């Protein structure tokens, strides 16, 4: 396993990955998207309407909302 990556492989194998697996596939996609989103600024702040998230991840509006509610946002 490599030691360095922009997104650490431990993301999937550590506590974060375990909790995300419990939350479901939508939560995993949203988490990875939030780490790599083109809409974040250098402070880590986002302007991210749910429709952007839905379109760019392919989850659809319901899937994107479900992924967000799985521990990231209150919608």
Image (cartoon, rainbow, N blue to C red):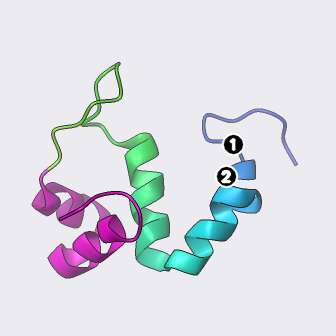
Which residue has dot 1 on it?
8
| Residue 23 lies within the magenta run | no
Residue 11's label in the rendered image is 2
Q: Position of residue 16 (x, y in %)?
A: 64, 57
User: What secondary structure prevails in the magenta region?
Assistant: helix
Count neighbours of disc 1 (C-alpha within 10 A) and say few if under 14, some if 14 to 19, many if 20 or more: few
Horizontal side of 45 relative to 11 (left or right) equals left
Q: Which residue appears farthest toward the front when viewing the image?
A: 74
Residue pictured at 29% horizontal, 58% vertical: 73
Q: Position of residue 17 (x, y in %)?
A: 66, 63
Q: CA distance from mark 2 to mark 1?
A: 6 Å
45 versus 60 height, above or below: above
**Which image quadrant: the C terminus?**
bottom left
Residue pictured at 76% horizontal, 60% vertical: 13
Q: Are marks 2 and 1 in contact (CB under 8 Å)?
A: yes
Residue 41: quarter of image: top left
Q: Secondary structure at mark 1?
A: loop
Horizontal side of 9 relative to 19 (left or right) equals right
**Which residue is nearer to you in this view: 31 or 72?**
72
Q: Which residue appears farthest toward the right when viewing the image?
A: 1
**Which residue is nearer to you in this view: 2 or 44?**
44
| Residue 59 lies within the magenta run | yes
Q: Position of residue 15 (x, y in %)?
A: 72, 58
- Residue stretch in magenta: 49-75
Residue pictured at 84% horizontal, 41% vertical: 2
Q: Position of residue 32 (x, y in %)?
A: 48, 54
């Amino acid at each position: 396993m490599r030691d360095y990556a922009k997104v650490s492989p431990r993301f999937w194998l550590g506590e974060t990955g375990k909790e995300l697996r419990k939350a479901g596939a939508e939560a995993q996609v949203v988490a990875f998207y939030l780490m790599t989103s083109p809409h974040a600024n250098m402070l880590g702040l986002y302007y991210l309407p749910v429709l952007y998230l839905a379109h760019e991840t392919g989850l659809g509006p319901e899937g994107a909302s479900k992924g967000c509610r799985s521990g990231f946002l209150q919608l």
